[in-house]
Amino acid sequence: MAEPSKVIHIRNVGHEIAEADLLQLLQPFGNVSKIALLQMQDLHNSVSALQYYSTVQPSVRGRNVYMQFSSHQELTTDQSSHGRNSDQESEPNRILLVTIHHMMYPITVEVLHQVFKAYGYVEKIVTFQKSAGFQALIQYQSLQEAMDAFGALHGRNIYDGCCQLDIQYSNLSELQVHYNNDRSRDFTNPSLPTEQRPKASQQGYPDPGGLYAFQQPGASYAQMGRAAMIAAAFGGTLPPGVTGTNERCTLIVSNLNTDKINEDKLFNLFSLYGNIVRIKILRNKPDHALVEMADGFQAELAVHYLKGAVLFAKKLEVNYSKYPNITTAPDAHDYTTSSLNRFNSNVIKNYRHCCAPTKMIHISALPQEVTEDAILSHVSEHGSVVNTKLFEVNGKRQALLQFESEEEATEALVSKHATSLEGNTIRISFSQMQSI
């Protein structure tokens, strides 16, 4: 082994290997300060890395690579640094280096694209994990677009109270993207292949902090973005039994109480799990209905949480339909433009509140002067209310009502959601609170 150096020379690096892949090999041992060769932040980290890889064969994307200390003790080229020089800020550049602080929710290429495309055409995104946290390189078409994004987004949060954007100008002149997947994307070249990611147990290619734990076999790129969003809302993992890969949007609901059910009541229940496109009660089978949801994830959540739920003394059967969608027809109620669809805004918040029917309902959009007696009078026909709580959040009147059973609470929700109480259209959802 040559004289120890902070600079490491890596051989057998194929064209399919990106800088982010090399970073993943060495960041467990310390910060990588520059890339041309690879320079660790200090000598101790460099020695630790090569000692480790003298006993473990490093491999990137299935290719064995080989490391040794470089004859250089320090890299000085400006092009080897992603971000700011320690003594001065980098000049404005169309490529931004973004670090995510307080990352409570997973951030995908799709999420970043949604945030940054508001300021111009995003050509390429590459993400990688560093010891300092999750980072991304974002390349705009023009310098002005990058400067606009920098000025508007630096220091801002992607989600309330977390996922803060720390933005710097990169010194790179062009991002190299070889695959369109959950870690990188070239929006100028959609025909790039989607790489099959090696298993996390593969030596030399660790899974960075479980970042890709939501990936399911055969899932598309767009699906993974939505799956990560849902998983984030549920605290980092999808609910047990939810795969996040379903593509079927239309559900068949059976064993309905034909005397009490209608399309709007079904809408009130199923819209808890996603936006509703259309609902159709079958004329030849009036205890059956088709429910078309906005996407397969939302349909899967509805199946997961509502299968076996009791509504109007009937145990619901909820399954995927053989029909891909509900054809527009006079007997198919269309909800595509309904303002009552819950997932038009606050998507993460709404996913976070998804749950099976409970005994507790949460009522919002109440009149400011409403009383508990008025609320009870509005819903008590549906069951026995054993406890109530009236409160304010940010000056807005809300209430919790606990029924004796889940069935009673479900009946109250489907019957009274979006009804008028003292001139206000109230909104009702299930609460996951066990008691008041």
Image (cartoon, rainbow, N blue to C red):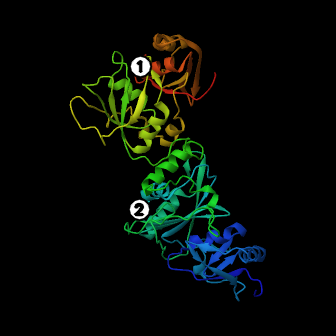
| Front residue (pair 381, 318) | 318
Judging by the rendered image, the residue that carries numbered circle 1 is 415
- Of helix, strand and loop, which one carries label 2? loop
Q: Tell me which residue sits at (38%, 31%) in the image.
A: 340
Q: Residues within 10 Å of mark 1 (few under 14, many from 20)?
A: many
Q: Tell me which residue sits at (52%, 71%) in the image.
A: 92
Judging by the rendered image, the residue that carries numbered circle 2 is 120
Q: Position of 30 compared to 366: left or right?
A: right
- Classify 169 as above or below 423: below
Determine if residue 10 is in view: yes
Quadrant of residue 6 in the image?
bottom right
| Front residue (pair 133, 236) | 236
Residue 171 x, y percent position in the rendering: 55, 75
Residue 356 x, y percent position in the rendering: 52, 30
Mark 2 or mark 1, which has the lower sequence index? Answer: 2
Disc 2 or disc 1, which is closer to the eye? 1
| Front residue (pair 371, 133) | 133
The N terminus lies in quadrant = bottom right
Q: Amino acid at mark 1?
A: Ser
Mark number displayed over residue 215: none
Quadrant of residue 34 in the image?
bottom right
Q: Position of 54 compared to 22: left or right?
A: right
Determine if residue 425 is in view: no
Can you name the residue that lies furthest to the left here? 330
The C terminus lies in quadrant = top right
Q: Tell me which residue sits at (46%, 18%) in the image.
A: 412
Residue 229 x, y percent position in the rendering: 51, 48
Q: Amino acid at mark 2?
A: Gly
Q: Residues within 10 Å of mark 2 (few under 14, many from 20)?
A: some
Q: Position of 115 compared to 12: left or right?
A: left
